[in-house]
Image: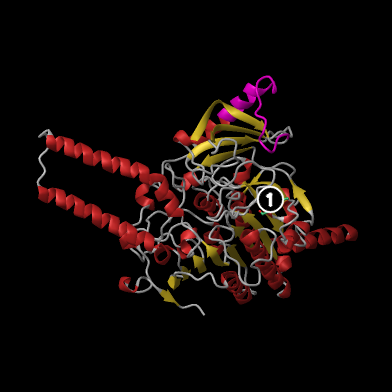
């Protein structure tokens, strides 16, 4: 009897001990921007040095089929923070532009959406976002901050509300020039055609316009062009600024020691919060163009400025891991590393340098749902709880972080909405063998592009594409002529029946299956169609946050740290 009681006591106390270790850990989330899965040592790169990120894999868990919910920044990040497909929150575009470009646009992550930061905050966590946001700022005025990180569950924000792009860095080229070059022939044609038709109508006597009205139209056109020129000339001042909480502290931001500043901020945040659980989301602007690296890293890698930027980011991650160790927090902290989507393979600088990363063996990249666009690094490190040096090949999603950390924090998942992510812990701890994702839906902006099916009873990973991007020039591994692939219209090829692959045998997506090569061809497609229609029926109509009206520049929403006459310039950084 005594022995039995003793045994029961032992069981009870060990279960308390493990529970204690597992409940309310600190959470550190690293997210890189545009980093490819083939850029990291732990995923097979032999020439780029990423020793600190590799440590996460060696001492933790490496996911080899970790899938971003979207191949573009804004929707992927919206899905990451909410655990839901971007279409559910209206964060998926119906036209060509799939991300926010301006600080003065009205779209953003809707206030009704619940981020993991908010749920953790409600559980007593202190939460910080350091780095890039890219999910909107204001709705109606330039200081309502309806979409701002502090309005979405973060106690502290230090970083970029929008995005780092070439136009933010002098002499690093321009994204808009490319766009203007691409569309200006069309615009000129339309304007020319309009003028000619006006002339003809006038000549035929079908339309009488006085010279005054004509002059007015010409003046209006000139003013409009003037405003546009002013805007693009001052892009850096209007969109590339650094905020601390609600204040703009550097407009435009300076690239000088930027990584050091982000790293210091993160370290200070950790040191301030050693007594209570914290959530740190360190969202690096690397390795999106404009690329940058500080003196210590410039010219040091074997892969130009791109490699230097990766290696500096890796250094920064090492600093954070060291800080956790020094403060004895490693055993109570779950660390996660990922990239928002695949590398932007079309990124080549004006003088021909490769500014896009590597997606390893995978096809395509950013903005496509080929594996190169969505298969991202996924590393989880938590000494004492997760076993070291384990590789998991099951399909997982970046949306899974939401339910995983919400549960670890002791919070309830929201009951009033669909959460698409699934708790990763059973898989990570080896309790479950199969992923809870039998199906994953791959969207290109708001268009359902492909479905992945991993049947429970088989090793196969089926992936069916309803359309694929038209690579240009033909035979290239990307859309080099338009710099980025698009999701609909003439930019894609539609497939009926869908293009089917088995990723377990053909991860490079080279050999589409046919009824001849795959005897279950039609049954597989039938199951996929069924899952797709169930999924589509679960979607609800919501306002589109990336509509043209919501992404356009609205001067009255322009955040500006000084008077407009001082050109929105200020610098409160050391
Ligand atoms: C390593 O990364 C660099 C930079 O993206 C790339 O050029 C190279 O091909 C990669 N190497 C491998 C083996 O993937």
Q: Let me know if residue 276 appears in the view.
A: yes
Q: Let me know if residue 109 appears in the view.
A: no
Left or right: residue 169 compared with residue 281: left
Give coordinates of residue 98: x percent, y percent. 46, 47
In the image, residue 291 sits, relative to residue 323, either above or below, namely: above
Q: Residue 530, located in which quarter of the rendered image?
A: top right
The residue at 47%/39% (across/down) is: 539
Q: Which residue is mark 1?
A: 38
- Does the beta carbon of the residue at mark 1 sit less than 8 Å from ligand 1? yes
In the image, residue 264 sits, relative to residue 454, either above or below, namely: below
Question: Which stretch is magenta?
Answer: 505-529
Q: Residue 326, located in which quarter of the rendered image?
A: bottom right
Give coordinates of residue 297: x percent, y percent. 65, 68
Q: Nearer the viewer, residue 538 or 350?
A: 350
Left or right: residue 567 compared with residue 203: right
Left or right: residue 368 compared with residue 248: right
Magenta residue check for 526: yes
């Amino acid at each position: 009897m005594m022995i039995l009681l003793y045994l029961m006591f032992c069981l009870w106390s060990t279960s308390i001990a493990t529970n204690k270790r597992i409940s309310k850990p600190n959470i550190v989330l690293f997210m890189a921007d545009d980093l490819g899965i083939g850029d990291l040592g732990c995923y097979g790169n032999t020439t780029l040095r990423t020793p600190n990120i590799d440590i996460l894999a060696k001492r933790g868990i490496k996911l080899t089929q970790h899938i971003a919910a979207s191949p573009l920044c804004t929707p992927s990040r919206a899905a990451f923070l909410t655990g839901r497909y971007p279409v559910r929150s209206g964060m998926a575009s119906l036209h060509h532009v799939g991300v926010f470009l301006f600080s003065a646009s009205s779209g953003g992550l809707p206030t009704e959406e619940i981020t993991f930061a908010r749920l953790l905050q409600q559980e007593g966590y202190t939460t910080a976002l350091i780095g890039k946001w890219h999910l909107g700022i204001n709705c109606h005025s330039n200081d309502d901050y309806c979409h701002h990180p502090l309005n979405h569950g973060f106690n502290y924000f230090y970083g970029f509300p929008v995005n780092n792009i070439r136009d933010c860095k002098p002499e690093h080229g321009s994204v808009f020039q490319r766009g203007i070059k691409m569309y200006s022939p069309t615009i000129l044609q339309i304007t020319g055609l309009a003028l000619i038709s006006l002339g003809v109508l006038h000549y035929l006597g079908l339309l009488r316009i006085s010279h005054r009205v004509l002059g007015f139209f010409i003046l209006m056109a000139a003013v409009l062009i003037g405003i546009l020129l002013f805007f693009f000339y001052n892009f850096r001042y209007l969109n590339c600024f650094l905020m601390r909480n609600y204040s703009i502290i550097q407009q435009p931001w300076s690239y000088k020691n930027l990584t050091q500043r982000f790293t210091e901020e993160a370290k200070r945040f950790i040191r301030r919060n050693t007594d209570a659980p914290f959530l740190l989301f360190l969202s690096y602007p690397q390795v999106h163009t404009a690329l940058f690296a500080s003196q210590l890293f410039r010219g040091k890698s074997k892969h130009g400025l791109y490699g230097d930027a990766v290696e500096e980011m890796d250094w920064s991650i090492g600093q954070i891991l060291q800080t956790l160790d020094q403060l004895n927090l490693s055993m109570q902290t779950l660390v996660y590393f990922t990239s928002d989507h695949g590398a932007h393979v079309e990124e080549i600088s004006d003088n021909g340098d490769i500014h896009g990363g590597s997606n390893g063996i995978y096809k395509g990249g950013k903005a496509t749902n080929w594996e190169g666009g969505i298969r991202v690094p996924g590393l989880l490190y938590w000494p004492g709880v997760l076993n070291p040096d384990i590789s998991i090949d099951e399909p997982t999603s970046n949306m899974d972080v939401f339910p995983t950390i919400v549960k670890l924090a002791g919070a309830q998942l929201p009951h009033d909405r669909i959460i698409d992510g699934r708790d990763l812990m059973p898989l990570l701890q080896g309790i479950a063998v199969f992923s809870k994702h039998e199906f994953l839906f791959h969207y290109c902006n708001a268009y359902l592009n492909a479905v992945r099916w991993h049947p429970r009873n088989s090793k196969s990973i089926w992936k069916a594409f309803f359309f694929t991007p038209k690579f240009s020039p033909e035979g290239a591994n990307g859309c080099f002529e338009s710099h980025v692939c698009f999701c609909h219209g003439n930019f894609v090829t539609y497939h009926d029946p869908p293009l089917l692959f088995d990723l377990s045998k053909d991860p490079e997506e080279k050999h589409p299956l046919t009824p001849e090569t795959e005897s279950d061809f039609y049954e597989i497609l039938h199951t996929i169609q069924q899952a797709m229609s169930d999924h589509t029926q679960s979607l609800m109509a919501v306002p589109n946050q990336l509509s043209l009206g919501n992404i356009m520049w609205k001067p009255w929403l322009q955040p500006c740290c000084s008077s407009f006459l001082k050109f929105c310039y200020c610098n409160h950084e050391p």
